[in-house]
Amino acid sequence: MNTESIHILNRFGFGPKLEWLNKPELKELLYDTSKLKQWIIETAPNYTESTKYFSDTLKHRVEKTNDKWRKKWEYAAYRVDWIDSMVELDNPIREKAALFWNHHIPISVGIWPFAQTLLLDCYREHALGNLGDLLKAIASTPCAMKFLNAYHSSKSAPNQNFPRELLEIFTLGVGNYNQKEIIEIARAFTGRRTIFPDIWDIPYPYKMYIDEKQFDNSEKTVFGETGNWNGEDIIDILLKQKQTAIHVSKSILKFFLNLEPDINQIHETAEFYYQNNYNFLKLIQFIMNQNWFYEKEYIGNKVKTPVELWVQFQRQLNLKALTSETTNFITRECGQVPLYPKNVGGWTSGYGWLKSQKLSNRLFLPAIMLKISQNENNLQEKSFGEKISNRIFNRNLLGFKADHKISFNEDLYKKTIQAHKLNHSNWLQVKSTETDLFQLISHPSYQFN
C-alpha cells in the first residue's frame, strides 16, 4: 500500500474506507498516487443544499422515530448528519474543506435553530471555491451578525467586533492592521440587519438586508483606497492584500499539513493562492503536487480533531453509528461541537487536543463504542470498566448505552484485512506491533494521522 496515497487520503479526506479493498477501482487508488490526485479533484462533489444532501447520503441511519436524541433535538441534528455524511462519502473533500473553514472562520449559531443549516450551507457551498465569496456569504448570515454584534451596528455607533475578527482571524492576521482601519471598516459594515425570529421558528433561508438610514453613506479610507465602501467592497480590498493570502495559507497548511509549516512553504502556497483568485480546489491540487507535502516529517504527525478521529475510525473499521446521539456524544465528549466554537478564536489545534481533560475520552471512547457493537446486550460493565477507565465507563456507557446503536462486523473486518495481506498496524497507520484491535485504537499514536 502506497504511503503517499494514504497520506493524501488522511489529509484531504478522512482516510480510506475498509470496503475499498473489495472494490478494484477504488483499491487501485491506494497504490497509484497519480490516479488518486486526479480522482480527488475530478470527483469532488458538487454542492447540494444540506437538507436534501443528508437525506440522500445517510441511507444506513435507523428510522428517525427510533432515534430518541433526534426526536428531542431535531433542530441540532444537521451538524450530526454532516459528520455522519463524512463517513459515507467516498470523496468527502468538500466536507473536509468545510470543516477547515469552520475552524478558520469560527462562527457560532447561538440559540437560533434555523441558523445552523444556514451557516453550514455557507461553509459547504463555498468550501472549494473563492475565498471572497465565502467571506461575503458568512458576513451576511444572522449567525455572524449576532455572534459578533454586527446586527445593531449603526452610523452613530459603528460596532468594531466583526471588523476586528475579520482582520485578525479571517484575513490579515494579528499585527497587520491598525486601529484606524478597524474604525473605517466598522463604518462600512453599518446598517446590516436581519429579523431575528422567535427561537423555535425556522425561516430558512434568512437573508441580510441594509437599513439605509443606519448605513454610513460617506467615504472611508481603507489600506490607501478611498470610496463610499460597503461590507462587500471591504472584503474585496482585503483580498487585494497579499498578507491575506499569507495568513490564510498558513492556516490551511497548519490544518492539512503540519502545526508549524515552513515559512518558505507558506509563501510559496500564498503566492499560488493569490494568483489563482483564492480558489481552494486549485490550491489543494497545488499542494498535492509539492514534494514537501510528502516529506517524512509530515506523515503521521498531525493530531486529529475530534471530528476527524471519529469519522476516520468509522471509515477504516467499517463501523457505523446508527443513531444521532452517538455521533453527537463522541465529538462533544472529545471537545468539539461543530458550529459551536468555544469563543471567537475557535477551537484549539494540534497538541492542544491532547493536553486537555478530554484526552482520556479520546483514547477510550472508540473502544467503548466498539465494545457496544460487539456485545450490546451482554456487557460485563464492572470488569470491562475497570480495565479501561471507571470514570469514563460509568458516565459514558452505563448512562447512554440504551441510546447507542453501532453497526460493526468484526469477523468481516478481520477477513478483509487477512484477504489483502494487511495487518491492523499498517492499515490504521499506527506505529505499534500490537495486533489486538482494542489495543490499537486505544494506543496514543492513533491520535495522529
Image (spheres, helix red, strand yellow):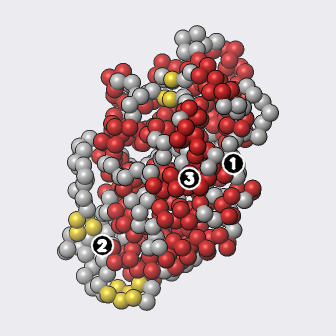
Q: Residues within 10 Å of mark 1 (few under 14, many from 20)?
A: some
Q: Residue furthest top?
A: 378
How far across and down, in percent of the image, does residue 165 sit? Answer: 46, 67
Q: Nearer the viewer, residue 383 or 418?
A: 418
Mark 1 or 2 closer to N-term? 1
- Looking at the rendered image, the disc whose residue lies closer to the viewer, 1 or 3, is 3
Left or right: 267 as drawn, with respect to 277? right
Tell me where residue 318 appears, x and y as whole percent: 55, 30
Tell me the kind of residue under disc 1.
Answer: Thr
Relative vertical location of residue 142 with respect to residue 319 in this rendering, above or below: below
Name the quarter where the N terminus is drawn: top right
**Which of disc 3 and disc 2 is earlier in sequence?**
3
Mark 1 and 3 residues: CB-CB less than 8 Å, in contact?
no
Q: CA distance from mark 2 to mark 3?
A: 49 Å
Q: Is residue 60 above or below residue 301?
A: above
Which of the two marks, 2 or 3, is nearer to us in this view? 3
Which residue is under mark 3? 35
Q: Secondary structure at mark 2?
A: loop
Q: Give the labeled residue for mark 2.
A: 190
Q: Nearer the viewer, residue 238 or 35?
A: 35
Residue 144 position, x and y percent, is 37, 59
C-beta proximity under 8 Å, tags 1 and 2 = no
